[in-house]
Image (spheres, grey):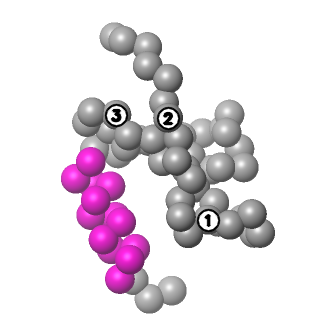
């Protein structure tokens, strides 16, 4: 397995005020997600189709 450093991008909806900040890193076949305030903490990994379905749902969900 190739050891590749992930390149993280902070969500455009994240701010420096508050607790809802996420970062995403993409590799072929996997989307990685972590809390931007806890970079060494746990990470989630999704197949791209699952991540796409979640993003589409979150964009239309009423909170």
The kind of secondary structure element at disc 2 is loop
Label 2 belongs to which residue? 7
Tell me, yes or no, whether the highlighted magenta stretch contains residue 27.
Answer: no
Disc 3 to disc 1, how far (Cα)? 22 Å
Residue lying farthest right? Answer: 17
Part of the protein shown in magenta: 48-60
Figure check: 30 above or below 33: above
Does residue 18 appear in this view? yes
Figure check: 20 above or below 62: above
The circle drawn on residue 32 is: none
Label 3 belongs to which residue? 27
5 or 55: nearer the viewer: 5
Residue lying farthest top? Answer: 1
The kind of secondary structure element at disc 1 is loop
Q: Dividing the picture into quarters, in which one does residue 29 lie? A: top left
37 or 7: nearer the viewer: 7
Disc 2 to disc 3, how far (Cα)? 9 Å
Q: Position of residue 13 (x, y in %)?
A: 56, 69
Label 1 belongs to which residue? 14
Q: In the displayed structure, does residue 51 sit left or right of residue 43?
A: left
Q: In the displayed structure, does residue 31 sit left or right of residue 20?
A: left
Q: Position of residue 10 (x, y in %)?
A: 57, 53
**Majority SS type along the magenta span:** helix
Does residue 33 appear in this view? no
Figure check: 54 above or below 7: below
Going from N to C along the chain, the mark reached first, 3 or 1, is: 1
Label 1, residues with CA under 10 Å away: few <14, some 14-19, many ≥20: some
Going from N to C along the chain, the mark reached first, 2 or 1, is: 2
Disc 2 to disc 1, how far (Cα)? 17 Å
Residue drawn at point x = 75 percent, y = 69 percent: 18
Residue drawn at point x = 53 percent, y = 64 percent: 12
Q: Count the marks: how many?
A: 3
């Amino acid at each position: 397995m190739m050891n590749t450093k992930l390149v993280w991008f902070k969500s455009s909806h994240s701010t420096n005020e508050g607790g809802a900040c996420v970062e995403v890193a993409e590799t072929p076949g996997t989307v990685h997600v972590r809390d931007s305030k806890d970079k060494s903490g746990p990470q989630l990994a999704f197949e791209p189709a699952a991540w796409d379905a979640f993003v589409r749902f979150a964009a239309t969900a009423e909170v």
